[in-house]
Amino acid sequence: MIEALSARSLAWGRTENNIRALAGYAAARKAEIGRENVFDFSIGNPSVPPPPCVNEAFRALLEETDPVELHAYTPAPGLPSLRRAIARQLSEKSGTDFDWRQVYVTMGASAGLAAFCRAVLLPGEKAVAFAPFFMEYRVFAEAAGGALVTVPPREDMQPDLGALTSVLDEKVKLVILNSPNNPSGAVLTEESLRRISALLSDAERRYGHPVYLLADEPYRELLFDGRRPLCAADYYDDTVICYSYSKSLSLPGERLGYLAVSSRVRDREAVFDAIAGAARGCGYINAPSLIQRVVERCLDATADLDVYARNREALYGGLRELGFTCVYPDGAFYLFVKSPIPDAVAFSERAKRYELILVPSDDFGVPGYLRLAYCVPREMIDRSMGAFAALAREFGLKKE
Amino acid sequence: MIEALSARSLAWGRTENNIRALAGYAAARKAEIGRENVFDFSIGNPSVPPPPCVNEAFRALLEETDPVELHAYTPAPGLPSLRRAIARQLSEKSGTDFDWRQVYVTMGASAGLAAFCRAVLLPGEKAVAFAPFFMEYRVFAEAAGGALVTVPPREDMQPDLGALTSVLDEKVKLVILNSPNNPSGAVLTEESLRRISALLSDAERRYGHPVYLLADEPYRELLFDGRRPLCAADYYDDTVICYSYSKSLSLPGERLGYLAVSSRVRDREAVFDAIAGAARGCGYINAPSLIQRVVERCLDATADLDVYARNREALYGGLRELGFTCVYPDGAFYLFVKSPIPDAVAFSERAKRYELILVPSDDFGVPGYLRLAYCVPREMIDRSMGAFAALAREFGLKKE
């Protein structure tokens, strides 16, 4: 009996992730009772506009460039000038050389993650992610025929390296690192990075094949309190950087990012070729042409990211004062709040009664927390405090 | 022994297709001897600018829309307003109803083809393509775990339906139709479409599972001599339309297209869900946001496609006069020229001596032809005639 459709594709198409489901609920609720009455912390869509250079670049390109050239196919890995600029920037900001010929421009970080999983994973092989993690990692690993293995966090949301040791078997080809982290806002310490590097190097020696470290860094510039980003490639040779301009340039819908294979990666040309082949198999022809040119002109700019730092203070401070327990976020634009009851899904449901839209952490591989995306207008945070106060009272939380 | 990389991804990344290779050669040659001295017929990149409404839409959207909203994530299947407009247009131009909830906006036709293969093909199952065909069909079918089976053409490049009958076994889940055709310029006749429909309906009854017809139609509007496009969904129930705005709006680099599941498809909601799941597995988050809005405003416009009709006359007439045998193209912007020697690859090499860049047909699944993309400046066609005359003389072709 031959099935009409791929059961796996069907299942992925039918299991709406919780974020999209809650965002849909929030949209419907806003239509019903008015935008200003819903406190929507569901989705990680930047709330600050792109920096001015983005609009200037759009305008100049549309006015000055021959439209046939402007909208033409680019080479599959991206415009050489953009790839060169990315490699130069990465090399300057780290202690590692990046060669432009191993930079592949992708349609956002997700396309890069999906392609890289297909480039390195074979059926039966494994990728490792540190919980809490972006839920699509599992889909991408399984779509490549592999499996995702997860490592639970410590209480402070730093990776539990003992647990990492126990999952590093011969089948592990890939470890995904996401710092600053979605959904917890935690930033990996240099000490953790060194120890992960040592463990992966041991595994490579033990098993005789590469274990790639994929540094998924869409929040690289979203670091608070004067922290500077660490480049994983400085600590571990077989590192590939996955980046997106969604957050730093506030262009999430435009789908632009890249994979960059560090020059320290053994057989880096082959890794690049496998990325190119995997991307080809997914039907990527090239990342959108106009936006490649826009981003090339704005490579050193960012949106006003200080807004998120101020939002963090307001939300973290406000919730702490009401008696909520939160992970103090060093980066990204998410606050990870401990659910006052063990079942975070049930808590998220109760929060809806106060028009608070909070994403339960279960889908991120950790139970018992709520993710609050604070890339929202500041005044919404301020106005939400009354609702949080009522919620805190219902659950008997004590003011600090 | 565990391999470092996926051998299949590596192979796809390393086998440059002939078109890209020749286009690269042409670019290098232009740099060497001057653009005007190279007659580059290699690549199907539109030579006419987008219609004026495209630039107007860009300008208006960038000026008038809140940039946070303009560049935000859209729903994964695309903006509802765009999906509604596409469904309305398809329904109006055919005798079949298309429901917007089964329109999935993709990053160009290739992304749609790749996703659809993953939605319906399981390991060991087959897709059928009529030769000559777009070479990536094979990659997409194999990337889904399936295989591509090809049906050779008749001399006039219409499908050989006897040959189709012989390949339609139980494992065939999908038949891909591309009319107007890349690379031959042939347009499927209504009679052929009726007979294909009858054969696929027979196969469905015989094997008890759907055999989907995927109508890959990026050249739908590029029809000459007053011809009107046929909608495959009017002839066959289990039809899915795959479209791209690359050619009709001259936006190939911007990557926008769609998959539309006809309302006659049994279990059309499930087909749509499987498409959505397959797209998710490939890391598609949404098609680029700004360009979705631009295309929505220009849905009934096209670039000045008459330019291609005039180019066709000039190139076809000129080459016929020099003694070349050509398939008369009823659509698209390609001329399929018979190689004067059996080995079209060798002929393509010889043509380079006259600075003529012609793609041999072998990669399209038919030996012995050359594809000439005539989406080029008209004056290049005129100037190329001296080079073609010298080539004709070398191979002893006789003037008409």
Image (cartoon, coloured by chain):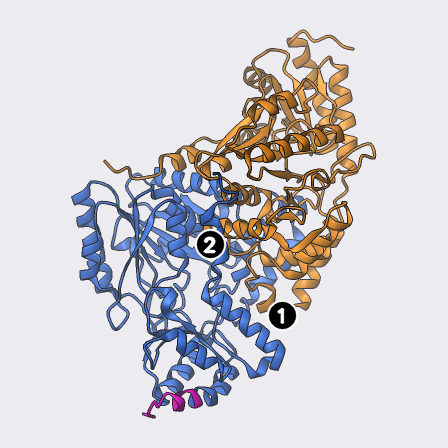
Chain colours: A orange, B blue
Query: Which residue is labeled 1 in the image?
Result: A66
Helix or strand or loop: what does disc 2 sit on? Answer: helix
Q: Which chain is mark 2 on?
A: B
Examine the rendering and report whether any part of residue B46 can be seen: no
Of residues B12 and B192, the one drawn nearer to the viewer in this rendering: B12
Select label 1 or label 2 by which is in front.
Answer: 2
Kindly identify the residue that appears in the image at 50 percent across and 81 percent down: B378
Based on the picture, tell me whether residue B392 belongs to the magenta stretch.
yes
Q: Check the picture and name the quadrant holding the C terminus of chain A.
A: top right
The answer to whether A49 is drawn above or below residue B21 in the figure is above
- Residue, far right: A226
Query: Quadrant location of residue A161?
Result: top right
Examine the rendering and report whether any part of residue B20 can be seen: yes
Tell me the amino acid under the disc marked 2: Trp
The answer to whether A137 is drawn above or below residue B41 in the figure is above
Kindly identify the residue that appears in the image at 45 percent across and 81 percent down: B351
Q: Look at the image and give the residue range highlighted in magenta.
A: B390-400
Residue B238 picture location, percent across and down? 28, 47
Query: Is there a contact, CB below 8 Å, between mark 1 and mark 2?
Result: no
Q: Check the picture and name the quadrant holding the N terminus of chain A.
A: top left
Residue B156 picture location, percent across and down? 26, 73
Query: Quadrant location of residue B269?
Result: top left
Q: Few, some or many C-alpha atoms within 10 Å of disc 1 (few <14, some 14-19, many ≥20)?
A: few
Kindly identify the residue that appears in the image at 59 percent across and 53 percent down: A269
The answer to whether A23 is drawn above or below residue B323 in the figure is above
Tell me the amino acid under the disc marked 1: Asp
Marks 1 and 2, how far apart in space?
A: 32 Å
Query: Quadrant location of residue A133?
Result: top right
Query: Which residue is labeled 2 in the image?
Result: B12
